[in-house]
Amino acid sequence: MQRLARLPIILQLAFLGAIAMLVPAIHAAVTLNWPLARIFVQSAVGGAVVTVLIGLALLGRPAADRVRGVLPTMLGVFAVLPVLLAIPMAAALPDTGLFNAWWEMLSCLTTTGATLYAPDLLDPSLHLWRALVGWLGGLFVLVAAVALLAPLHVGGFEIVVDTEPAPAVGPGGRTRTERQARPDSRIRRISADPAFRMWRSGAAVAPPYAGLTLALWLGLMLTGDSGLVALCRAMGTLSTSGISPVGGPVGAPSGGVPAEALIALFLLTALSRRMWPGGNELRTTRRLRRDPELRMAAALVAMVTLVLVIRPMLGVLGAADPVSTPEPAASGLVGGLARSLAAAWGTAFSALSFLTTTGWTSVHWEGARAWSGLSAPGLMLAGLAIMGGGVATTAGGVKLLRVYALARHSQRELERIVHPASVGGGGTRERQLREGGAYLAFIFFMLFAMSIALVVVMVSIRPIAIETATMLSVAALTNTGPLAEAIPLIPAYQGSAGSAGAPWAGWAGLSVFTKSVLAGAMVAGRIETLAILAMFAPGLWRR
C-alpha cells in the first residue's frame, strides 16, 4: 500500500476515474444501450491499463519531496484529468469534438455544472456520467482541502491558523511548556507525504459523503422523482455541482416543495466544514448554533427573503401600494397570503442554493420574481454566489468565514470609533479572525474582484456585451454554472453570446477562445486565486 501511495496523485486519481466509467457502462447495459456500454467499458479498460503501465514504470523511482508539488498537482488534476474523463463522451458524441467534451468534464469536475448540451440531447447514461464526475469532483475537493491545502495554510485555512501556540496551563494556574513526543523520522516522512494524507482523509470523508448521497437519493425517490433523476440530483446536491438530467426547477416535474425541502436540508453540509470529518481547524466555536458560517448564512438567506417578500406583502395588506398586479393564487386576502408564502419559500430555497453555489431554483422562484416586482432580483443570487459557502467545503465563492471576518472587523472598528478605550473580547480565536484573519480575507476579496475584472476583459475580447461577460465570469469563478440561467439577462445573452435554440444553450454558442478563458476561470475559482499565487512563492520551491 505504501508503494502504491508513492505514485503521483494525479496517476492514482486517473486510475480511479477509469474504474468509475464502469458505473455508466453498467447503466447503459441495463437499459440495453449496448454501443454506449461498449464505449464506456473500452474507455475504462484502456484508461486503467495505461495508468497501470505508467505506475509500474514509476514504482522503481526513488522517493522525492512532493510537498512542493501539491499546488501544481491540483492544477494538473483539473487540467489533465478531464481529458481522460472526456474520452467516452467524445466517442459517444462524435460531432461534439474532444475540446467540447473536455470542457464539459472540466465543468463537472470543478463542480461548476455549466453544460453545452440540452438535457434531451444526451443519453441517460451520459447524464449519469456527468453527475458522477461532479460527485467525484466534490469528494476530491473535500479530501484535498484537509489533506493538501490545510498544511500549506491556503484555501481558507490561512485566516484561522494560530500565529502563536497557546501555552499549556499547569497546576496553580501557571503556564508550562509541554514536551511532545517526537515521532520516528519514517513516521514523520509518511505523514508529511501528500498521497498518504489524501488516503487518510479520503477514508474518513468518503463513507459519510456516500452515505448522505444514498439517503438523499432514497428520499427524493419517495417524493416522486425517478431513480436516475433522484440519483443525479442527490449527487449534484452533495457536490454542489447542480447537475441534473432534466431542466427547470429542482422541484419539477414531480418532487415539488417536499423534494426541495429535503435538498435544502442536505445543502447545509456546504455551509460549514464542521459537518464533515477533518474540520477541527476551522471550528471557531464549540457549539453548533454559534457557528459563524451558519449564522452568516442564515442572516443572508433571511435578508434576501425579506427584501423580496415583505414589500409586496405590505401591498397585499393595503399598507403600501402594490408593486405588481399579477393574479393571486386565490381571491382576496387568503390568496395573497398564500402567494406570499409560496414566494417566500421560493426565494429562501433559491437563496440557499446559490449561496452554496449549487445554482438550483425553486418551483416557486418565477412566482417570487413576479411577486417581488423587481426588474432583476436574480442579481441578488449572483451576489450570494460570490459570497459562497463554507471554507473547505464543496462550495465556491469567497467563502462565508472570510465574509464573517470582514464583518466582525468592521463592527470592531465602529465600536472603537464610539468607544476608543473599549475591549473587543471574544477569546483568542475571535480576536485572530477580527485582526489577521480579516486582513487576509480582504486580500483574498481584492484578488477575487481583480480576477472577475480580468476574466470580464478577456471574455469581452469577443463581441459579447459587458452584462453577459460579467454574468459568465461570475458564474465561472464562483463555480455556479446555472447562474447564467437565473439572471434575467437572457435577451442580451442570446444576442451577444449566441444560442442553440434556447437561452440556456448559450454556453454552446461561445467561441473556443471564450470557452478556454472560462475554463481557466473555473479552475481558478476551484483552487482559489490565493493558492495559485502561492505556487510562485520562492519559499515553496526553495530546498
Image (tube, grey):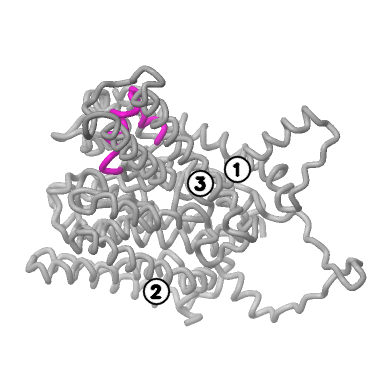
In the picture of the structure, the residue carrying the numbered disc 1 is: 404
Number of numbered labels in the structure image: 3
Q: Say left or right for 20 vs 313.
A: left
Contact between labelled residues 1 and 2, with CB atoms less than 8 Å apart: no
Amino acid marked by disc 1: Tyr
Q: How crowded is mark 3: few (under 14 residues within 10 Å), some or many (20 or more)?
A: many
For the residues marked 3 and 2, what is the alpha-carbon distance in whole angstroms?
30 Å
The mark closer to the camera, 3 or 1, is 1
Q: How crowded is mark 1: few (under 14 residues within 10 Å), some or many (20 or more)?
A: many
**Judging from the image, what secondary structure is the residue with disc 1 in?**
helix
Counting from the top left corner in percent of width and height, residue 414 is at 72, 30
Amino acid marked by disc 2: Gly
Earlier-in-chain disc, 2 versus 1: 2
**Image: magenta residue range:** 362-381
**Judging from the image, what secondary structure is the residue with disc 3 in?**
loop
Residue 350 is one of the magenta-drawn residues = no
Mark linked to residue 76:
none
Q: Is residue 258 above or below residue 354?
A: below
Amino acid marked by disc 3: Glu
Residue 484 at least partly seen: no
Residue sitting nearer the eye, 340 or 265: 340
